[in-house]
Amino acid sequence: MPRAKKLRVGVLVSGRGSNLQAIIDAGEAGKLDAAVVVVVSDVADAYALERARNHSIADVFVDPKAPASREAFDEELISVLTKHQVDLVCLAGYMRVLSPRFINHFHHRIMNIHPALLPSFPGLHVQREALRHGVRFSGCTVHFADEGVDTGPIIIQAVVPVFDDDTEEALAARILKYEHQVYPRAIQLFAEGRLEVKERRVFCKGSEAERAVREGWGYIQP
Ligand code: GAR
């Protein structure tokens, strides 16, 4: 069900922004009922900001050293996102834990992407841990953010195999290709109003969307 008005997406980043790029590209290709309206970084020279500028999207650096506290920093983020009338906040390689105030302000309107099959391997050094544990499959997860680190109700996942000769870099690169597919897809499901959160599970309304999510739970081909 296409929306009359496009969903306004604000993206929080800390680094290179390849997921941001995938979301921008999907929007520009007409695959999303959503558009990125602002990109906010806590790192002044994050390449993601340049990507935003390349597409004439507002880019904002919020200096984490300036505000007195994490709460004050998050207040600034809220005010930037509110100024841009953001409906959905997407964390795309944003490496800070959000305050309860931020999470409550955008309740179930914040998504995060993580390069593992959560709840396995949250946090940092994800591929190193996956290889250390000898898992046969890894992948990526898009979930609604809550107050934890890489926790919160799971929206969509993609699975990739882990090979015996994998390095951290090789596994990360294999997963990243799927990140770029599942994030725009999760945003589109949200834009269509099809995601419903009950306790810590996400249900997808509508048979077509349910099929999409079910595919997401399996192995997504490029
Ligand atoms: C992505 O792999 C994303 O899943 C990960 O950071 C990378 C950012 O890449 N996020 C996390 O680990 C969150 N815990 P990008 O800047 O190229 O999108």
Image (spheres, rainbow, N blue to C red):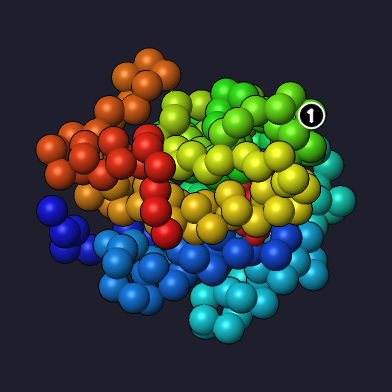
Residue 30 visible in the shown view: yes
Label 1 secondary element: helix
Image coordinates of residue 199 in percent, x first then y, are 38, 16
Horizontal placement of 55 versus 190: left or right?
right
Q: Residue at x 71, y 39 (%)?
A: 164
As rendered, which of 47 and 129 lies closer to the eye?
129
Judged from this view, the residue extending furthest toward the top is 199
Categorize mark 1 by other alpha carbons within 10 Å: few (<14), some (14-19), many (20+).
few
- In the rendered image, which quarter is residue 116 located in? top right
Quarter of the image with the C terminus is bottom left
Q: Which amino acid does label 1 sit on?
A: Arg
Q: Which residue is drawn at 55% across and 63% down?
A: 20
Q: Height in image: 86 above or below 134?
A: below
Horizontal placement of 149 versus 81: left or right?
right
- In the rendered image, which quarter is residue 112 located in? top right
Respond yes or no on whether mark 1 lies under 8 Å from ligand 1: no
Judged from this view, the residue extending furthest toward the right is 65
Image coordinates of residue 74 in percent, x first then y, are 66, 43
Residue 140 visible in the shown view: no
> Residue at label 1?
132
As rendered, which of 187 and 71 lies closer to the eye?
187
Q: Residue at x 56, y 28 (%)?
A: 118
Q: How many labels does the image show?
A: 1
As rendered, which of 128 and 73 lies closer to the eye?
128
Image coordinates of residue 73 in percent, x first then y, are 72, 45
Q: Height in image: 147 above or below 4?
A: above
Horizontal placement of 167 versus 109: left or right?
right
Image coordinates of residue 128 in percent, x first then y, are 79, 37
As rendered, which of 160 and 214 lies closer to the eye?
160
